[in-house]
Structure formats: structure tokens, C-alpha cells
Image (cartoon, rainbow, N blue to C red):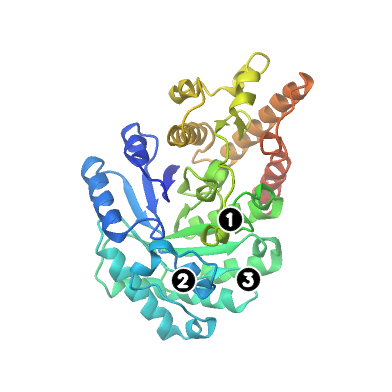
Amino acid sequence: MRLYAQVGFGLGDKLNKGFKENLIDGAIFSPKDLKRDTMKDKIAEIRKGFPKADILIDPQFYVSLFSGSPSVSLGRLTEWNYFRKYRKGDLEQAKNVREVLRRCLQGMAELDVTGLISPNIYISQSFDSREAVIAKTFLREAADVYAGLGEERPLYASLVICREALQDRREFEEFINDITMLDSPPDGIYLVIAGRASEARSDFFHTDVLANWMLLNLSLSINGLKVINGYSDIVTPLLGVAGGAAGATGWWSNLRMFSMDRFFPGEGGRQPITRYLSNLLLNRIACSEKDASPPFVPGIINKLSHDTDYDPEPERAIEVLQSWQALRALNAQIVTEDMAEGMGRFRQAIEQARQAYASIAAEGLQLDPKSRDDHLAPLAEALRQFEERAELS
């Protein structure tokens, strides 16, 4: 499974280091965070130095319906000619959807990307909504509009869904049936699942959300669509087991888990502490917890080259390199072409994590809330539910 950098504010030289060390396979750029000319130059630099890298741009058109809000932060998005304020009523007309698609794809095609992501809106409530109808129109029209541009690069139609929509099984299954029966399908799907807040771990580590996220990957991939999962972070190998082609993560919390609060910044606060991604725990832990644990749970340390960066605590730019390296190793450990084998490997990883957390608890080490094991139960139950509903058992 391929691993991409989810690019946002504070780029620096993180991508160059990630590509040079073969930690990532590609990058997904954010128009909100980079000037068009800056992005163009950075893409050209990467393409020259790392010609095999996959380079994509998320149009982030999904924020357009919110662009009239006085508190929205659009950043550099307004510099792109496809982006403007829309009402839902405007986008209920197919001709307007086609015009948005044409302008966006023409603008993206001018850059040296390896594939293009088409725009879509955000399904913010349920699959039984006006938003879902509009989103399906974007999916249906994308390939036909793209064909008119004479492009040969692959097209990935974006699909951005709130986690609440994934909790209604009947509506979800109807939606799946609709989007897997497109007359003119794209080459793939850029899939983003959104939580209520990028810090709300329980929004993502929820049984129904994870199981349906997996089923989306399975259903789309079975129908010949390459699925690129944006903002998938530690869930990446789980989605790879279900047929996903790629996952992505970045250096800030809002580049690891997606939420529309990325466009509605708060009043600020203390910067999050640097953490260490432990593959054994399937979780990030604080540096102090990492240092306290190895004597009685040695497997917490991944035994990878960037482990040495954590003595002493590293800067943020180094933290993401450790995350990419750990996730790359976890993908290699778990994801395989045999789905049943991959699921077995993930179950084993969950059980090993449980045993490690039990050892930590037995030693009396108190972990902070983000470091605890509350993610393991929904992961295990999501695997069980996925296997049952996909009729794999």
C-alpha cells in the first residue's frame, strides 16, 4: 500500500526528506495553504528530484458551500479561478456542476501533477440529503468532463463524507450501490472521511465508521477504482487490508484526521506535544511515556532509524518523518494481496497491542488520554463487522 504526505501549512523541507529516505510515495497538496506559484515551483522541484513520486492536488472545493461564513478561513483558495461561493441550489443543476468540474480540472492540468483530483462538495449530514444527490452528480459527470480535456493522466473523483453518514447502514448501502454503477467511472476515488473535530479521536475510532470506511474501499476497488484515502493516518493499514491503494498523513493533527474545522480555526492555544508513533500500540504516545515504557515493554520501540531522533525530544519536522517511517513499516507488516491473511495480521497486531497495554497497566504507568487503548476495541469490532458484511467469513 502506498503512503502519501498530506501537505499543509509549514511545509519546509519535509517532503524532500521523506522522498529522499523513501518514507513516502507521493504528496497531496492543499491549495488553501500554498500560493499557486509556490506550489507550482515545489511540484517541479519534486518531479525533478523524485520522478517516480505521485503528485496530486486536493481542490478543497468542498468548503465552497461554507465560504459565505464570516469565520471561514479560505487561505489561498480564492486565488484559484474554480473556487467561488455557491449555494446548494446552484449545484443541483448538472450544467453548473460540469462548469465547476471543467474550470477546476483545466486549472489543475496546467501543473505537473501525476494525476488529477476532481472537485466535489461535502456530505455533511447523511446519504439521504440534497448534498448526497449533488455529490453523486459530481461523481457521474467527472469522467465525461475530463475526457473533453484530452488528458491521459488518471482522474480521481473526490468523495468527502461526514462520519455521521457512515452510521446509517441502510442509507450507506444504497449510496454504495449508486456510486459503483457509474456509466463513466473515473480511474479512482480520493476518499476523505470527516469528523466533527480533528482532535476528536472517538469520531474516527468508531466501529461503524471504520467498518463502512473499509467497505467503501472494498466496494470501490472491486469495481476497478483505485482508492486513495486522505487523512487516514494510523487507520491506513486497515484500509489497505480492505483494498485501498494508498493512505495519507501529515505533520499537524488536522493533516492526520480531517474535519471542516481545518477551515474554521479557533482562537489558538498551546501547540500539541511531540509524540512517538509506536507500531506495537497502534498509537502515538508522549515522549515521556516512550522513555518510561521500554524496560518492561521493549516492543514499544519500533527499532527503526528515526527512533534515535527521540533522544532528546525532536522538533516537529522530525516527528513526521518518524510517523511516515512507522506507518510504512506497519503497512509492510500487515497489508497483503490476500485479504483474509491481511485481516489475520491486523487481528494479531490488535492482540499484541492489548497485551502491551496490559503490561503497561500492570507496572502502574499512567498514560494520558490520547495514549490509552480505547482505540483497540472499535478496531477489532470493525474488522469483525467488515468480515461479516463483506461475506468473507
| Residue 314 visible in the snapshot | yes
Residue 128, percent across and down? 65, 75
Q: Quadrant of the N terminus?
A: top left
Q: Amino acid at mark 3?
A: Phe
Q: CA distance from mark 2 to mark 1?
A: 36 Å
| Residue 145 visible in the snapshot | no
Residue 153, percent across and down? 29, 60
10 Å neighbourhood of mark 2: few (<14), some, or many (≥20)? many
Name which residue lies at 50% across and 23% down: 310
Nearer mark to the viewer, of 2 and 1 = 1
Position above or below: 365 against 186: above
Q: CA distance from mark 1 to mark 3?
A: 32 Å
Q: Secondary structure at mark 3?
A: loop
Q: Which residue is denoted by mark 2 in the rendering?
A: 139
Left or right side of 366 for 286: left
| N-terminal-most mark, 1 or 3 | 3
Q: Secondary structure at mark 2?
A: helix
| N-terminal-most mark, 3 or 2 | 3
Q: Which mark is residue 267?
A: 1
Figure quadrant of residue 170: bottom right
10 Å neighbourhood of mark 3: few (<14), some, or many (≥20)? many
Q: Which residue is denoted by mark 3 in the rendering?
A: 127
Q: Are marks 3 and 2 in contact (CB under 8 Å)?
A: no
Figure quadrant of residue 299: top right
Q: CA distance from mark 3 to mark 2?
A: 14 Å
Position above or below: 233 against 167: above
Viewer-side residue, 212 vs 389 = 212
Left or right side of 241 for 368: right
